[in-house]
Amino acid sequence: MSPRPPRPALLPATPTPARRRAVLLPGLALLLLLSTAARAQPVADAAPAARAKATAPVAVRTVSPEHPPELLKTLTNGDAVLECLVDVDGEVRDIKVVSETHPGFAAAAEEALLQWEFKPATLDGHPKAQRIVIPFEFRLSRDQMLASVAGRPVFMEVTETIIPAQQLPQWPRPVDFFVPRYPASLAGTGKYGKAVVNVTIDKEGKVINPRLVKATYPEFGMPAMATATQLRFAPQVMADGRKIYVSMDIQFDFEAPKEKSAKEADPAEGKAKKKK
């Protein structure tokens, strides 16, 4: 008979150590409680320093600048930004030009700014000098532009009947004719075209109420309308001797100005080169 396999030995079970409960001594518990409370306590901010009270200059009297005459003739709008010192008496001093689209605008703005009056800036209730920057805009409305060119108001209400020029036996012709100025904004572009303006001829032969009908480029519109207001016609008279209002369209042509050669721009320089 084959021997029986040996029985596995039974080892005694290892006793599981008893769990220990954490016990806080009364003194230690009180110490931890105080420590936690100390960490949660917000830190008191230091007393804020008193801030100085300041106010900026306030304009109490302003004067609008006049549009420079040389730029009014060319119907030019623009801007100028000036910097100045407002002293403790509220007077303007030490004006400086920050930027300008044309020197004429800066000069006109400075002349106007010198007439401004201010309530001076203050610090803790005491007046103080302070530098400020003031922008000026030069914008002419359509009515202002045309009135400036014509030297009179050009828009007015007409309550009488206006006769279309097509119904007259003869087409009205201007006594004097003017060529519109080519827009400066299109200089060097080579653009050309036309603009058609509808006008009313009053009983004295003056042009009123110009209206742009169409234009090859928008820039042609205002010069064409400005030129139309300068035209003068013979008064239109009916067979019975009555003077009438007449409406008609006028076309203005625009051609790009030719660029001058170096010789044309400076004849002296051209002659000098020719001698060489």
Image (cartoon, grey):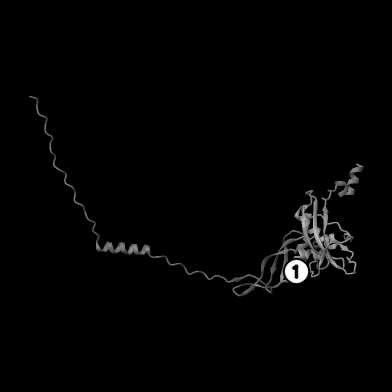
What residue appears at the point 77 percent right and 55 percent down from the top-left corner?
214
Q: Residue at x 37, y 63 (%)?
A: 40
Q: Residue furthest left?
A: 1
Position in image of residue 94 (x %, y %): 72, 66
The percent coordinates of residue 37 (x first, y second) are: 34, 64
Residue 168 at x, y = what percent?
87, 61
Give percent across and percent down for residue 41.
Answer: 38, 65
Q: Quadrant of the N terminus?
A: top left
Q: Is residue 52 left or right of residue 89?
A: left
Residue 170 relative to residue 158: left or right: right
Q: Quadrant of residue 58?
A: bottom right
Q: Is residue 65 left or right of residue 7?
A: right
Q: Quadrant of residue 210?
A: bottom right
Please give the residue where the numbered disc 1 appears in the rendered image.
112
**Kind of element beneath mark 1:** helix
Image quarter hosting the C terminus? top right
Count of numbered marks? 1
Q: Report crowding for label 1: few under 14, some 14 to 19, many 20 or more residues within 10 A (C-alpha).
A: some
**Closer to us: 256 or 157:** 157
Judge whether 214 appears above or below 60 on screen. Answer: above
Asked if residue 272 is positioned above or below residue 167 in the image, the reply reads above
Residue furthest right in the image? 275
Q: Quadrant of residue 200?
A: bottom right
| Residue found 76% across the figure and 53% down from its top | 217
Q: Is 2 rendered above or below residue 225?
A: above
